């Protein structure tokens, strides 16, 4: 190991680091190409992570769900506690979807392959995707406890020594909707890790390395140092924030305190409300991951994800609160609460680094569709839509762009073919972005009609329906989100049956604005008017813009 470390210089480290990221990206491409569902192939609800032999994160796919840089290493440690490295053999593939061991809900499958060289483990590849189905009620917020949310697979071997465990395959197949898509996506993860194995071994051969230990150490050490430097530039102190969000029987409170001391940071969620009897509770693994992602956005967003940038950050939460849910709490739609961790953290640090803080985003909107295609096969998939992006200092929020997560919408033509529904309308909503010196991104309206000739069940998972995305430093809030069934506003956490011809509409929230609206340049208001992003009435009312445009 010492000899290997001596061969690494700054230029060489940079080249090899870039190649590890490229390998991660190629594994993502393999995963996308071999998947069966649009959840992976179009929406990219996935993550690929490369870990060294000690389980430390070296690289993550560029187009991956960013928060899973915080869950994948912890998932690997749970897997190795069940199957210690000495018990693993070449060709083994280990899986789990346990919410408390994985990513916070049962709908994500975690697939790990140990990488052997000369009978010694030199790395691990983990591939994570959101499955089309895992049984139970289906992906939504309707569950009252974890047992309603389908199969919960413990850490187990899907392949042992290259031989597939067909019992697990049949167990999953017999308990899910759209079984061909589910099994296809599960095995796509296996294929992706196999492709990663070949590329990682070729990497070692090309550079004459015996393992990844020295390179991983250098990558993580440099990232940790950069993160500590950025944290050290923030003023020391205790920073607090508390927000209210949509609950079940009334508003829920999320609270945090962030302590900055030198080059380290502690985030605690004391004061957060307790769990509820709906599927919106958040296991701590997801909460911590959201914190790590949020702080990375404020410190070293330019560095590829790896384990070094998370070292200076400690996260705690009271056991049993919304952000540290314990079994048997239902967690299926944990993103509905978990996505608020970012604006909660950003709001706390607005006093420390206001120039880096983003106004609230309209956030991602997910809706599960289950039923039967007009051609007779089962349908179980997710429609992704987005509100507007929050504005930043000197930068308008992008229209219909998700934050803090990053899944993509399925193209209309693909969606209609897959589900035998029709997207009747999809348009930007003028005046939906928060006003400010920088304007919040616009929300949108999407109307989907059931043309399948069968009943379709939809599970709504919408937030931002009572508490709008907040502006920052004088910026205004964005428009609220709303779901409508045949023009009637419905519970954003409910599930509904769409008869043939029924329509469901997603009215997406706008992003919050940044800064005093009086500071918005005249040319920016003119451009907004020309694009139809704001109406003449709003220009006069919000910006004092007197025009007959």
Image: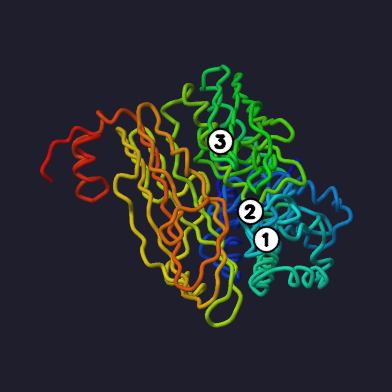
Give the Cα distance between marks 3 and 2: 17 Å
Q: Which numbered disc covers residue 478?
A: none
Q: Residue at x 17, y 35 (%)?
A: 545
Pick the residue in front: 63 or 196. Answer: 63
* Residue 128 visible (yes or no): yes
Q: Please tell me which of labels 2 and 1 falls first in the chain.
A: 1
* Residue 163 visible (yes or no): no
**Quarter placement of the N terminus:** top right
Q: Residue at x 79, y 69 (%)?
A: 171
Residue 491 lies, in percent from the top left, at 52, 51
Residue 130, compared with residue 285, is above or below; it is below
Q: Residue furthest right?
A: 87
With 197 as the anchor, is 299 left or right in this view?
Answer: left
Instruction: Verify CB contact (< 8 Å) between mark 2 and mark 1.
Output: yes
Task: Find numbered disc 2 in the image and state the secondary structure of the residue it sits on.
Answer: loop
Residue 236 lies, in percent from the top left, at 56, 17
Q: Residues within 10 Å of mark 3 (few under 14, many from 20)?
A: some
Which residue is under mark 3?
Answer: 251
Pick the residue in front: 245 or 206. Answer: 245
Q: Residue at x 61, y 75 (%)?
A: 378
Residue 48 lies, in percent from the top left, at 63, 55
Q: Please tell me which of labels 3 and 1 falls first in the chain.
A: 1
Task: Find numbered disc 1 in the image and state the secondary structure of the residue it sits on.
Answer: loop
Displayed quadrant of residue 254: top right
Which residue is under mark 2?
Answer: 142
Q: Residue furthest bottom?
A: 375
Q: Which numbered disc covers residue 137?
A: 1
């Amino acid at each position: 190991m010492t000899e290997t470390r001596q061969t690494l210089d700054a230029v060489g480290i940079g080249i090899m680091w870039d190649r590890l990221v490229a390998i991660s990206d190629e594994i993502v491409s393999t995963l996308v190409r071999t998947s069966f569902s649009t959840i992976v192939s179009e929406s990219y609800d996935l993550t690929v992570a490369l870990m060294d032999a000690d389980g430390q994160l070296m690289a993550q796919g560029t187009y991956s769900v960013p928060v899973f840089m915080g869950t994948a290493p912890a998932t690997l440690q749970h897997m190795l506690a069940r199957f210690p490295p000495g018990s693993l053999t070449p060709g083994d593939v280990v899986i789990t979807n346990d919410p408390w061991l994985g990513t916070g809900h049962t709908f994500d499958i975690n697939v790990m392959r140990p990488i052997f060289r000369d009978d010694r483990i030199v790395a691990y590849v983990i591939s994570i995707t959101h499955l089309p189905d895992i049984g139970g009620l289906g992906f939504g917020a309707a569950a009252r406890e974890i047992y309603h949310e389908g199969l919960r697979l413990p850490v187990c071997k899907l392949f042992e020594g290259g031989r597939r465990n067909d019992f697990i395959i049949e167990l999953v197949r017999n308990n899910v909707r759209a079984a061909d898509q589910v099994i296809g996506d599960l095995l796509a993860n296996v294929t992706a890790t196999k492709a990663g194995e070949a590329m990682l071994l070729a990497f070692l051969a090309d550079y004459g390395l015996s393992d990844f230990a020295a390179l991983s150490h250098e990558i993580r050490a440099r990232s940790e140092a950069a993160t500590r430097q950025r944290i050290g530039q923030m003023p020391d102190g205790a920073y607090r924030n508390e927000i209210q969000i949509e609950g079940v029987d009334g508003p829920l409170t999320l609270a945090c305190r962030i302590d900055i001391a030198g080059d380290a940071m502690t985030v605690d969620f004391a004061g957060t409300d307790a769990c509820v009897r709906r599927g919106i509770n958040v296991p701590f693994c997801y909460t911590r991951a959201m914190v790590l992602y949020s702080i990375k956005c404020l410190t070293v967003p330019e560095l590829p994800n790896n384990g070094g940038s998370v070292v200076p950050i400690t996260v705690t939460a009271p056991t049993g609160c919304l952000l540290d849910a314990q079994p048997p709490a239902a967690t299926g739609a944990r993103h509905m609460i978990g996505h608020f961790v970012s604006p909660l953290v950003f709001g706390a640090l607005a006093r420390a680094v206001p120039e880096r803080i983003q106004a609230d985003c309209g956030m991602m909107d997910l809706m599960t569709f289950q039923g039967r295609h007009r051609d007779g096969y089962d349908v179980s998939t997710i429609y992704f839509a987005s509100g507007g992006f929050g504005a930043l200092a000197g930068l308008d929020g992008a229209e219909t762009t998700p934050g803090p997560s990053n899944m993509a919408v399925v193209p209309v033509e693909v969606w209609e073919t897959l589900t035998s529904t029709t997207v009747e309308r999809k348009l930007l909503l003028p005046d939906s972005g928060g006003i400010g010196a920088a304007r919040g991104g616009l929300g949108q309206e999407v109307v989907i009609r059931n043309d399948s000739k069968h009943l379709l069940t939809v599970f709504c998972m919408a937030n931002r329906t009572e508490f709008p995305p907040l502006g920052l430093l004088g910026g205004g809030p964005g428009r609220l989100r709303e779901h409508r069934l045949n023009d009637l506003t419905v519970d954003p956490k409910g599930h509904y049956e769409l008869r043939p011809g029924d329509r469901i509409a997603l009215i997406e929230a706008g992003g919050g604005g940044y800064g005093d609206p009086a500071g918005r340049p005249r040319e920016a208001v003119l451009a907004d008017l020309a694009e139809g992003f704001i109406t003449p009435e709003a220009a006069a009312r919000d910006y004092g813009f007197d025009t007959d445009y």
